[in-house]
Amino acid sequence: MRAHATVSKTTTKAHRLRRKDAVIATDRLGSLCRAGMSTGEALALGKRSRDGAGKILGLLDSRVRRGRSLSAAMSSSDGVFSEAEVALIKAGELSGNIGCALGLLAESMEAQSAAARKIFSALAYPCFLALFSLAVLVFLSAAVLPPFASLYAREGRTLPALTRALLDFGDTFRAHAATGLALLAASAGTCSLALRRSQSLALICHRRLLKLPVAGPIAVAAAKSRSYALISALVGSGCEVDKALKLAAAAASNLDISLRLRKTSRILARGSSLSRAWRRSGLDLDGSECGFLEIAEARGDYQGAFTKLARINAVNHRQAIERFSAVAEPAAVIFMAVTVSAGAMALYQPILGSASMVSQAF
């Protein structure tokens, strides 16, 4: 009972760790194994660090000491490692090259984290500008302009149209902001629950995402670069290509890409060549990928082919994000300039009007 409680408590802590900690832990463990240490020795040394990576390594060490393999310990870490990542380590254990498998896994996980950081950085600045602009308008309408409205009402004069519009915006925001946020949160929760429970609905949404003008190229390149990098790592660790495709499909971030990878694996299992299966499943959208796979079939270097395809899609992903940023950032700046200018004019006009009223009174 005590042992079970300790494991549950440790698992809960590991579940709260960031993805970045898992990447560092994997890279650290791989470096120690490649230096000549056994898995147990590397875990015992790596868990001494007091950071998040050390906590993950401590969790793995406690399970390995009870007789589990490293892959089995990773599979029961409550989502810290995906099914495909665990399979990569299992392939390394079977081939006897666990250090290389850990290194490949660390590279794959770091590439995924880097892609997520690029998307976040591309969205952060435009979103900040938009929220700042709205905050300025709310502040003007709630704290600065109401005294002028009272002054104009006492004098029986009408506020300028732009000032009235901004005050109406502030009144509407204060009256309906809480309700609107509650409805937005409820809608988001309902949509999230529906997508989790209905795979057909999630598949429709994922397919529509891939066809969107701006977000589509980003989503396609991101899903493909991650999946291809994982297939390369799995094949490099000794996993068969068809099994690597199945495992990559289970870990794919987009359901449409996942289904196409599964279809490729089924066609390949029926005796077709990889390039032909790739073309029939619809993964080769622009006709450039099958050429790499045909060369791989001639040379027997599937890992090298998938590594090149992963790098190409990573470049496409970066370029798609740069194109998005080139449009989103100027649009956000223009939006901020327009809203702040409108707020300044809405404030400037009643100030001039109140000054004229004061001069007439004297």
Image (cartoon, helix red, strand yellow):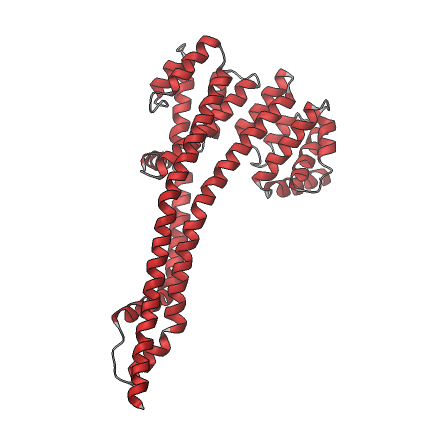
Q: Is residue 57 above or below residue 362?
A: above
Instruction: Identify the residue shown where x is 37% and y is 43%.
Output: 326
Which quadrant of the view contains residue 285? top left
Which quadrant: the N terminus?
top right
Instruction: Identify the residue shown where x is 59% and y is 44%.
Output: 16
Instruction: Identify the residue shown where x is 58% and y is 42%.
Output: 18
Residue 358 location, x and y as percent?
32, 86
Residue 288 location, x and y as percent?
36, 20
Q: In the rendered view, does 295 fall on the left or right side of 211? A: right
Question: Of 37 and 353, which appears nearest the observer?
Answer: 353
Q: Does any portion of residue 12 appear in the rendered image? A: yes
Instruction: Identify the residue shown where x is 61% and y is 39%.
Output: 21
Question: Of 8 and 345, which appears nearest the observer?
Answer: 345
Q: Is residue 178 above or below residue 147?
A: above
Question: Of 1 and 99, which appears nearest the observer?
Answer: 99
Q: Does any portion of residue 82 appear in the rendered image? A: no
Which quadrant of the view contains residue 102? top right
Q: Is residue 219 above or below residue 184?
A: above
Which quadrant of the view contains residue 177? bottom left
Q: Is residue 335 above or below residue 342?
A: above
Residue 211 location, x and y as percent?
31, 34
Which quadrant: the C terminus?
bottom left
Q: In the rendered view, does 49 fall on the left or right side of 156? A: right
